[in-house]
Image (cartoon, helix red, strand yellow):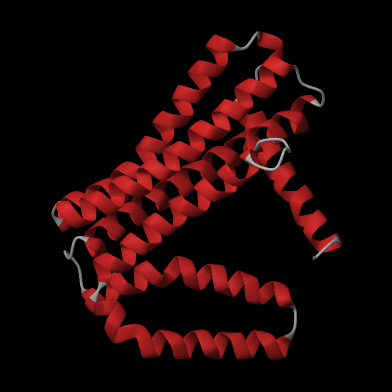
Amino acid sequence: MTGRIAPVLRGAAVFALLVAWAVLAHLGSAGESDANFGAALGVAPLIVIVALLLWRVRNPLWLVAGGLIMLAALVAAWPTLRANVPLLYLVQHVGTNLALATIFGRTLFGGGDALVTQFARVVHGEISERKIRYTRGVTVAWTAFFIGISLTSVLLFNLASAHVWSVFANLLSTPLLVVMFAGELLCRYTLLPPEERTGVVDSIRAYRLNMRRQQKTTLADPS
């Protein structure tokens, strides 16, 4: 029983954290909270990413030097950051979605498998031409989705109020992502036969395995 409850509790905790983050980010980017708090919340993801990258270096000297450089950069840029909190969140939102669009989109060129096709091969091994075409189409759809979110974000930031843009960027992004997942799942069950379908859990597992394989490949061949 405990083994079954633990994943549910973890999922609930992650969901609660995401909701809290979205609400606080909305208040910060819409100018409805303290500027220092809004700026701190806005740069927090970047700090976490840099800290994780520094930690992987495993060299105490580089770890300390990188930490000091990051701290100095934050101190120097803080007046600008706190004076431009909405712009900070725009860069974060658009940058994240463009990065995801790049991750999906770059696999559509060069003759290799599209990203979702790679996931399908992790789960099923050999796959049919029909599934190759379908998974490539899904990769195109996700690329277009992230580009569309980025363009909409920029347009709303420049043409609408800060409140309207913040609702879209911070409160609607995750629901739109869920709708996209649900739509793709519906298409999967409509267009593919049962033996070629992949469940949500298998898709997540395939994503993790594929990322691990790419990391191992990168470490083995840094060039």
Q: Looking at the picture, how far across and down is residue 148, in whole percent?
A: 37, 41
In the picture, the quarter occupied by the C terminus is bottom right
Residue ID at (84%, 61%): 221
Q: Classify 195 as above or below 28.
A: above
Q: Looking at the picture, how far across and down is residue 219, in whole percent?
A: 81, 62
Residue ID at (67%, 75%): 55
Q: Nearer the viewer, residue 114 or 178?
A: 114
Furthest residue to the front? Answer: 110
Q: Looking at the picture, how far across and down is residue 130, in whole percent?
A: 68, 15
Q: Is residue 1 visible?
A: no
- In the rendered picture of this protein, how many numbered marks are placed on residues? 0
Q: Classify 82 as above or below 65.
A: above
Q: Classify 86 as above or below 111.
A: below
Furthest residue to the right? Answer: 220
In this image, 143 relative to 58: left or right?
left
In this image, 203 relative to 35: left or right?
right
Q: Quadrant of residue 121?
A: top right
Residue ID at (49%, 17%): 186
Q: Looking at the picture, how far across and down is residue 51, in whole percent?
A: 58, 74
In the picture, the quarter occupied by the N terminus is top right
Residue ID at (30%, 42%): 172
Q: Quadrant of residue 136?
A: top right
Q: Nearer the viewer, residue 14 or 171?
A: 171
In this image, 175 relative to 182: left or right?
left
Q: Classify 45 as above or below 80.
A: above
Q: Is residue 217 visible?
A: yes
Q: Quadrant of residue 176?
A: top left
